Image (spheres, grey):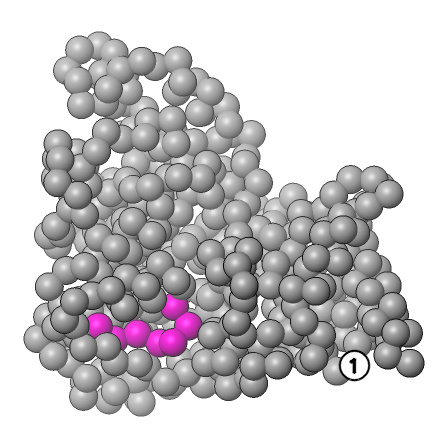
Amino acid sequence: MTGLDGRRVYLDWNATAPLRPEARDAMLAAMDEVGNPSSVHAEGRAARAIVEKAREQVAALVGCEPDEVVFTSGATEGAGTVIRGRWSQIVLPSFEHDCVEKAVAAHPSAAIVRIPVANGGYLPADDYLREFLGASLASEALLCIQSANSETGVEQNAFNIVFHGRESGFRTLVDAVQYFGKRTTWNDLESPADFRLISSHKISGPKGAGALIVRSGIQIEPLLAGGGQEKNRRSGTENVIGIAGFGAAAEAAQRDLDAGAWDRVEKLRDRLEERLEAIAPDLIIFGREAPRLPNTSCFAVPGWAGETQVIALDLAGFAVSAGSACSSGKVRKASRVLTAMGFDEVTASSAIRVSMGPTTTEAEVMAFADAWEALCRRRASRAA
């Protein structure tokens, strides 16, 4: 018997969130529409109506105008679209997601400037940041920042950072993938961000759909040449089925926010951490002193390899991770997010991440804690 009552327990929501029934229903309905959304006949118009309804649903959750939503295959495509531009300088911290990091590294000519990171994973205070950005500015400069880190859950005051960047003349790209749907997002009247990245499968929509939010009046060059879909901002026939599911998931995510679902999740996360600390007094909880996403706990017992724990927990019926899904499943080095926060490689390699969602139960979380405690005891007995 594994997991809880013989069924597996999924605690890897930051990697991908389970598909919502509302999204599944919307996708099934969209499968019956045969038309290309660029066609002018009735079938095409029906497909177009699905896309535009979803655009409005996503915009409502983001807090932007529907025309600012550019549907993509996901955040990686959106990041590549923005970052490949004619930037002379790109400024970012060392803990950005791989889709941003690797797009920046591939830029043929931009100078790369790193914002220093405090030990808690939080960026420096406003006065320092304003001075740093003012000193860093070159012509055609791009500032990249995450709203929240996928590994640690640490949230940045992205609004202030973007505001300082805009004051200094930067264009700004915010990776809002993990923040989107878990926190109330900025209204466009308040947010000066030029570009924002969001992803469907992080809010329990389908994989392979996402959006780049482009502030009104900003021009972008499409990543690929083609038919000029998405108002010449993203060529290629729209993924009507995926977009339908994305829109339905966004609408349902807003209901979760309104109902306080993530407040309940945060209490579950906090109870889990209290239990883990009682089990292992040498436990490190990364980013605990900083603002964090309500669903994320990244922790380590230094010297106990994270991948070893993940494999053992998988065999016990629990799905967790040793870091970002885009870098796990490979031969892993120490997390660069954690080393950027000042942790040594042994500690950074010992981390595992538990992430949960609105359907996660207290019984599931405590069953995980029981399983982890059993692994701790087994490890201690072998060392004795």
* Residue 193 visible in the current orientation: no
Residue that appears at 56% across and 81% down: 345
Pick out the residue farthest to the top.
Answer: 42
Residue that appears at 12% across and 40% down: 225
Residue 96 picture location, percent across and down: 38, 68
* 375 lies left or right of 175: right
Q: Secondary structure at mark 1?
A: loop
Residue 367 picture location, percent across and down: 81, 54
Task: Depth check: give the residue in front, 131 or 24.
Answer: 24
Chain part drawn in magenta: 90-96
Total tally of numbered discs in the picture: 1
- The three-letter amino acid code for the residue at tag 1 is Pro
* 370 lies left or right of 147: right
Residue under pointer 1? 281
Q: Is residue 284 above or below residue 331?
A: below
Residue 192 picture location, percent across and down: 23, 63
Quarter of the figure that contains the C terminus: bottom right
Q: Quadrant of residue 277?
A: bottom right
Residue that appears at 34% across and 66% down: 101
Pick out the residue farthest to the front.
Answer: 331
Residue that appears at 51% across and 86% down: 342
Residue 94 falls inside the magenta stretch: yes
